[in-house]
Amino acid sequence: MGDELLGWLCPGLAPEEAAPLRRAITVLRLLRDDARHCGPRAPAPWPAARGELERLARLARRRALETLLRALLAAHRPADSFLELGASTLAPAAAWRELLGGPDALAPPAPDEPPAALAERLVRAGLARGAPAPWAEHWRAAALHVLAGPAAGERAWRRALRAAEKSGAPPPVRARFLAGRVAACLERTRPRAAWALFARHATLAGADPVLRRLLGWSALLAGAAASARELLRGVAPAALPVPLARFRTAHPEWAVFLPGTPRVEPPRAATVSRTQPVGEQVDHDGRDEEDPRRALARTFLGALERSEAASALWLEPDGAGHLVALARRGARPGAGRTFSAQHEFLARALIEGRACHAGERGAPLARDAAAGLALALRAHGDGSVLALLVLESPRPRAFDEGLERALAARLAACERAWWAAAFRATHRRDPGEDLALFPEAGWLAGVEALLADLRARPAAVLVAGAPGSGRRTLACWLEFRAARALGGVGRVERLEGLARERHRELARGGARAWLVAHASRAELRARGELAPGLATALHPRALRVPPLAARRDELPALVRCLVGNAARRLGRPWPSLSDEALACLWRQPWPGEVAELGAVLAELVRVAPAEVGLGEVRRALAARALDVHERLAEAGAEDLAAVLAHTRHRNGSANLARAARYLGWSPARLAARLRARPPAP
Amino acid sequence: MKRPREASAGLGGLLCGPPEVVLARLRGEDPLRLRARVARRLAERALLLDLERALLRVQAAVALAGAAACGVEEPEAWLEARVDEALGQLLAEERAGPASPALVRLCAPLGLDGERLASACARFNHLPAEVRRAFFALVLEGASPDALARAQALPLGELGRRARAGLEPFRGLVRAREAPSRVAERRA
């Protein structure tokens, strides 16, 4: 490197530093030249090549074992656990395929094999395949953490960390163990103990971003805000396992650690007293850009006609008595004034539960006192205010009764979408990670009736479905709705591996719980997986997630959601799927359910170009050893309704050619099928 | 560098059989031109990796995944994906693993510690791609900063910032190397 360039890049570099730096760069140039001259050379010795092959095969098996351990623990990990298990690039089914063959094949899990025994068997299999001792220590501690609780986990992590320190393990290994211990401390509501670990192991904080993030959260919860900022700077953002708002409500034990916690009960209704500073909070705009509620608000305001309002504002109560502006169109209502002038007006709208006409009630919204209207979006059950719409028009008496009724009806029609958006916003594990559940789906129509039943008698409810179908997400959705509609706190628990003591506790009744299971009540009872007392104490109405093949109407939206998640997770551009590609995905049977669809889409995002075509989809399916179904053998009424709805022309008429392409049929066959058995209108 | 398109014409036949047999076929005359592929990807991604070590890993990865290649419609894309996968694995492993013998061999005559330089290379390889590319072009290729900034439509300051960030792991290496001697001086 020339002196001039070195001087430009490293101003003030001392000569004694410059000489070794030049030598290092010389080595790098030689290394690059070596890589560039890629003509024919003698191949590496056979033992080296063979050794590499064996090493890679061992690594592949260990990766498969890790995938299984991760999937096993993720299935048992509580939703609010701080333990991060990492991401797998392999699907569990593919991992089993990898491990079930070969001379040292692993026996598949027995139906009655306890999760702890399976985890131990997988760890031993790893050791037998040459995995290092810290690898086994890590997974044993993680298994204890998840399956035996954070107290046992903390002890295991501490032992593992001590052993790693004694054996001189590298910092990344020690940092992983420390991260587990910090997570266990946090789960035991001991943020100060977690934060104290930083003082003892400060040098490890830079070795692992997960540890850094956990320490940042510990600092935050222990009240060391400046240290938290410092630790979290530059770390990839990730949400707390439980959003702060839910810490305040669902985890009252955390309340003492959170400044500004107004109350610990779940918010039943948005109540804004006249003395609270509503106006001061209105301009706060610091929410996550990806917040689905913001997207909903923008969509709603974007659909308003110019003639309906010159300016519009969507506000939401934040649970602490403040209003937050989520979206705005046109000039801000009350332009030129501070919003505190509208404090009384908005509070009245909230408290009295009716629309307020500003111009007529002495609370002018605009400088020229033209016309203003505030409408509240209320929860169907308890009437609590979910959102506020504030409109303003320069025309006097612009909001006549007809327009007001129409706007109120349009706002009320948003309620289901609002709940869905709020659920997604509060339950996202990571920023930008959207949940693949669409509460507006027909098979979820029984939820409101179930909630009404639970109001009368709290009980445990069985949420059944095939693995990977989204049972846990559904259970979280039910708890989310129940927390708002009924108050109190319920728990989402996995039935497999649930302690018998907990079975007995739930059998006594009186507590709300959502038991995620893989089979129906009768099947579980027959297999002895449900204690007899609990079987009778369960709520009679069980919810079952239908297989993905039975709800193809959701598939296009699911694909959009999962592609977005994968693109954000992998840091890849968001590819667009051609219609043929989507059609191919649409007609597959998806035996591995939503999880399998997600894995195929993640593979597409990882390797495919910006425009994903049919060829890429076929390859991604083949890569996961899935048969590519070129046509749907038989389409049920739901399939036909779904495909006709999805493929119709913009003017609403059916597009038979496109629908036939989705089904993999000829248009003539589809037309004949529709003539023979027309779908219900 | 010319893209080796024709090399993968007989992919199915080459990759059928047990992994050891496939590996033996791949090593002989490099029928899939894996060496050229690896070299091209290292240059494109501006990675400081030992070509021989990367090639060994790629050959092993292709041999191991050979059965999956039967029936692949686009063998080129499949091979490129295997190369990228193997390079990704190497990048993930190189932080904890020992330095490659080639690097140690190159360091010895210049009085540098191969292990430390390998660790600095590992840190470099995890920097953002634009930083690595700026470092390659300016520091290793010796391109003119002005010409490069014009060609890439970048402000000169930004180009310098990137190259400086790429140089940082190696400056750290020099500092770490010099530190003990300074301590000794102070003690003296």
Image (cartoon, coloured by chain):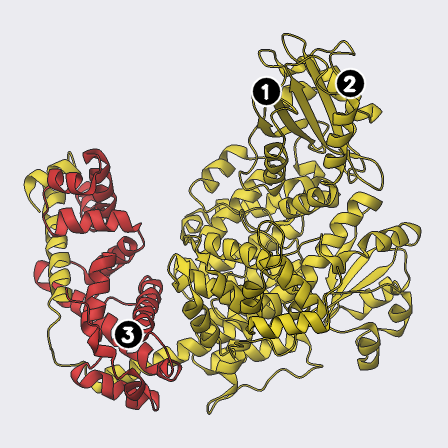
Chain colours: A yellow, B red
Can you say whether A504 is above or below A404 in the image? Answer: below
Question: Along the line of sight, which residue is nearer the eye, A399 or A93?
Answer: A399
Pointer 1 and pointer 3 on the same chain: no
What residue type is disc 3 on?
A: Val
CA–CA distance in space, label 1 to label 2 = 22 Å
Query: What crowding class fits label 2: few (fewer than 14 Cα within 10 Å), some (14-19), or many (20 or more)?
Result: some
Residue B2 place in picture, x, y as percent: 15, 66
Which label number is shown at residue A274?
2
Residue A51 place in picture, x, y as percent: 30, 83
Q: Please state which of the two labelled residues, at mark 1 or mark 2, is closer to the viewer.
A: 1
What residue type is disc 1 on?
A: Arg
- Secondary structure at badge 3 equals helix
Which label number is shown at residue B58?
3
What residue type is disc 2 on?
A: Arg
Chain letter of disc 2? A
Question: Along the line of sight, which residue is nearer the eye, A608 or A226?
Answer: A608
Residue A23 located left or right of residue A63: left
Residue A201 place in picture, x, y as percent: 46, 50
Count numbered badges in the picture: 3
Residue A389 place in picture, x, y as percent: 69, 28
Residue located beneath label 1 in the image:
A332
CA–CA distance in space, label 3 to label 2 = 69 Å
Residue at 73% over, 36% down:
A410
Q: Quadrant of residue A503?
A: bottom right
Residue B104 located left or right of residue B85: left
Can you say whether A51 is above or below B2 in the image? Answer: below
